[in-house]
Image (cartoon, grey):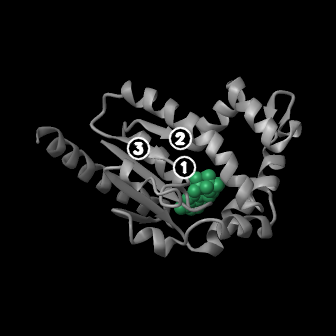
Amino acid sequence: MIVGLTGGIGSGKTTVAKMFHALGVPVYYSDLEAKKLMVDSEVLSGKIKALLGEESYLDNKLNRSYIANKVFTNPDLLAKLNAIVHPAVKDHFISWVKNQEFPYIIQETAIIFENSSEDRFAKIILVTAPEKIRIERVVSRDHISIEKVKERIDNQWSDEKKAALSDFVINNLDLEKTSFLVAEIHKQLLKLSSFTSKF
Ligand code: ATP
């Protein structure tokens, strides 16, 4: 059973994904894997250089700030980059998932509803937090400006819109409460996956 885990920038989806992982659930970190593929795959890096320029890489490493500056203010370029990267991540995910034996797996990904991929998931978990807190978290984690974080938030769907389409919503403020909720959802997903595999 494939469970999607999503949330806006700074909501804490990676933090929540790690909690599921600590319970033994296999987790596929889409952004992380995408960044690895963007460096390791020559086909992919060639396409990215053709789209965004040679400066997309510095010493064979991804020039993240250059790429972010280019695409986060230009929805057309972002869509083109996604159209290059997403199919490669999808193929990699499919081969990863085949090797997992747990009753369910989690795919952590920033985008589910925005690209209408909700049908790929048996269940969807949404992580939320108030915008002000998300901005504070990202500014202190990435040392970027408040304006930059706001620009990225404006490119994503609102929590309200996503919550209406999600099966579980974790309002991630107090880490202990989040961890408790994760354990509860884990129990429900285990039950659901054993039910699904019987019928
Ligand atoms: P992004 O979309 O940028 O990848 P994310 O949704 O995966 O972000 P995280 O990286 O998990 O978010 O969290 C952002 C920052 O906030 C991290 O530094 C993390 O340690 C911190 N954080 C996450 N949850 C909490 C919380 N409940 N209380 C305090 N800090 C938190």
The quadrant the C terminus occupies is top left
* Mark 1 lies on residue: 14
Q: Residues within 10 Å of mark 3 (few under 14, many from 20)?
A: many
Q: Tell me how far mark 2 sits from mark 3, CA to CA.
A: 9 Å
* Mark 3 lies on residue: 106
In percent of width and height, residue 165 lies at: 38, 67
Amino acid at pointer 2: Tyr
Query: What residue is at 43 percent from the left and 40 percent from the top?
Result: 21
- Secondary structure under tag 1 reads helix
The quadrant the N terminus occupies is top left
**Circle nearer the N terminus (2, 3):** 2
In percent of width and height, residue 139 lies at: 74, 62
Query: What residue is at 41 percent from the left and 43 percent from the top?
Result: 106
In percent of width and height, residue 187 lies at: 25, 50
Instruction: Give the number of the disc on residue 47.
Output: none
Instruction: Give the number of the disc on residue 29.
Output: 2
Amino acid at pointer 1: Thr
Q: Nearer the viewer, residue 85 or 174?
A: 85
| Ligand 1: quadrant of the figure | bottom right
Amino acid at pointer 3: Ile
- Contact check, label 2 and label 1, Cβ < 8 Å: yes
